[in-house]
Each structure stands twice: as structure tokens, then as C-alpha cells.
Image (cartoon, helix red, strand yellow):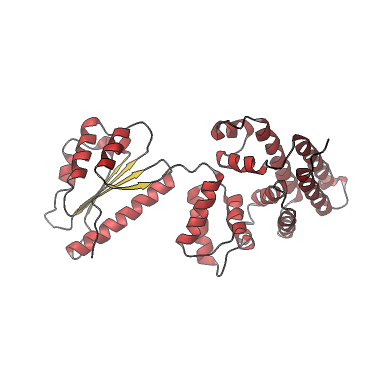
Amino acid sequence: MANLVPFTLIVGEEEFLVDRAVREALADARAALAELSGGGDGDLHDMEASALGQGELAALTSPSLFGGGAVVIIRNAQNAGKEIAAELTKYAKAPVQDAAVILTHAGGAKGKALVTDLAKAKVHQVACPKLTRASERTDFVKNEFRRVHRQADADAVRALLDAIGGDLRELASAVDQLDSDTDGRINAATVAKYYRGRAEATGFSVADHAVEGHLNQALEQLRWALATGTSPVLITSALATGVRLLGRVGAASRNANPNALAAEVGAPPWKIDRIRQQLRGWHPDGVAKALQAVAEADAQVKGGGVSPEYALERAIRQIVTYRATPTR
């Protein structure tokens, strides 16, 4: 039996999640209308709230001469005028049969009264808040794997974030690619196979494991990176960046805003929370010694030593040691 949701309110500023929520609500509405009408999936109207005129909502949701109902997508409702906001609230309390309204709102103070009024009208709501914390993006990737019914271990999730970064659209696309191109449980090696072209990201994966004290994982990533052609210079650069960020974030106030701090230290906002987590177990003296160890490895990699591989492995072991044992 068709279940047409007459009014859906999508609130949040995470663009990818909002776009996905709109697509899903639209697909559900059209499927329900097709079942109710015996074939037609309704007229579609897609517009900005700022362009909606008084009385226009009633016309858009009115039954068509040809039947099939209607789906009306109204975007950025925070920009609606008071009169239009009042019309939307009034409609939500008594929606038209065989019509579905999908409304997006960025959240925040602007137009907040409309969200409050629609909540009182008990419309269906979908939250799409901005994902700024590292843990939130980790959860997002885990949920993406669940969405495609695939199992992925923690190292795979982490490797994907290291390779792709914080863009949700790219992360979701990467999960879809891994789902379509691989079989079985997805692990870090699976992810690495598809994203080895991102050489710098590979180096950052080594660096993250090292500064977090995961010696075996860091050495495993190092060996894989070198085996797949990643330049040792890129790895020492990533190690230097990882240790340097520890020092910069560690020296800042714990109450500093992640976005402001990101701009100050030269890191993406999504990574600030992760760096703060990595700082656990570190002492300022240890950070200084680790940076010195990386500088020595860099000199050896660039011609001052016999084996770049040995220099990198030695630097990683030193970083892990300095994290566990503060030096003076």
C-alpha cells in the first residue's frame, strides 16, 4: 500500500546530505503517487523559496486535469518572506491529498520560526547537520558501507578518510566504487589498491599511524607505500607535516574553534579533532625530538644516507618511542 508523505522538512547545511535527502524524498513521493494513481508519478515543481509568490503553493499542489498528483520541492526556505512562511505553515497543517511538498532549510537563526512552526505541525523531518568532527565523518563512512550492505574493517574506513579527505560526496562515491569493483570484506589493502595514485595521502596514512603510536600499522603502510611506488620524499614530508601539526595544535588553546584553528595551522577543519586525539600521550619535548628525527630522515632520503627505506623505518620507530617516553 502506498504511503505518501505529504510534507517533508529537510534541515541542515551539509549540502551532500541535503541533496541526497531531497532525491530520496522525491523518489518515495513519485513511487507512492504512481501506485495511488495507477501509473502517473505526478507533476514535478522545483523552485527556490525566495521565488515563491503568494498563493502559488496552492496552485502548484492543486490536482492536475490529467491526475497523478504533484511533487513540489521548495529550496532554502530560510529565505522565504513572512507571508510565504505563513502559507507554508498553514498548508502543512492541512496538506492537499495526492501532493507532496519537500522543503529544505539551512537551519540557523534565519527563518527559524518557520522550522519551529512546521515542527509543531508534526511534519516529517530529516536532519542534515554539518559534519565537522573527525568522528562524525568516520561514522558517515561506516554508514555508507552499511548502506551498500558491505563489511569494512576500521582500518579500511580510516584508509578511505586518509585517501579522500573530508568531502562527503567524494567519500560516498568512493564507497560506491569499492562496492561495485570488489568482493568480500573490505580492508585497508583494498582501499589502497584503488587510491594508490594519491601518493601524498598514502604518506599521511603512514604519518597518522606513527604519531598515534601504532608501530606495526605504520611500518606496514610504509612498506606498502614504497612497494607501490610512493616517493620516500613524499613520506618524509607527510611525517613532518603530521608531527608539526601536533606541535601547532598542542600549543593552541583547547577551547579554540576548530575552523579558526584550522586556518591558523594550515589543516582542514575536519582534521583538527583528529589531531587533538593524536596528541594524547605526547609531551612537547617528545614532539620536538620527533620533528628532529624526521628532519634527519629527510636529509638521508635526499641523498645523505645509504637506504631511504631504512631511514624512514628508523624515523617511524623514533616517533613512536618519543610519543610513549617524553624526553628532556
The reply to whether residue 171 is in sight is no
Residue 291: % across, % down: 77, 39
**Residue 26, above or below 108:** below
Q: For this rendering, which residue is in front, 209 or 183?
A: 209
12 to the left or right of 281: left
* Residue 209 coordinates in the image, percent (x, y): 69, 50
Could you tell me which residue is drawn at 18 percent across and 46 percent down? Answer: 60
Residue 139 lies, in percent from the top left, at: 51, 52
Work out whether residue 315 can be spotted.
yes
Q: Is residue 133 above or below residue 146?
A: above
Which of the image's four quarters has the C terminus? top right
Q: Residue at x 51, y 47 (%)?
A: 136
Foreground pick, 248 / 192: 248
Corner quadrant of residue 53: top left
Give how far across and how far down residue 316 sits, in percent. Answer: 77, 49
Depth check, front residue: 72 or 93: 93
Q: Is residue 184 above or below residue 58?
A: below
Q: Residue at x 38, y 34 (%)?
A: 108
Indicate left or right for 131 with 92 as reference.
right
Q: Residue furthest bottom?
A: 183
Judge from the rendering whether residue 51 lies leftward or rightward of residue 296; answer left or right.
Answer: left
- Quadrant in the picture for the N terminus: bottom left
Which residue is painted at 67% across and 34% down in the image? 250
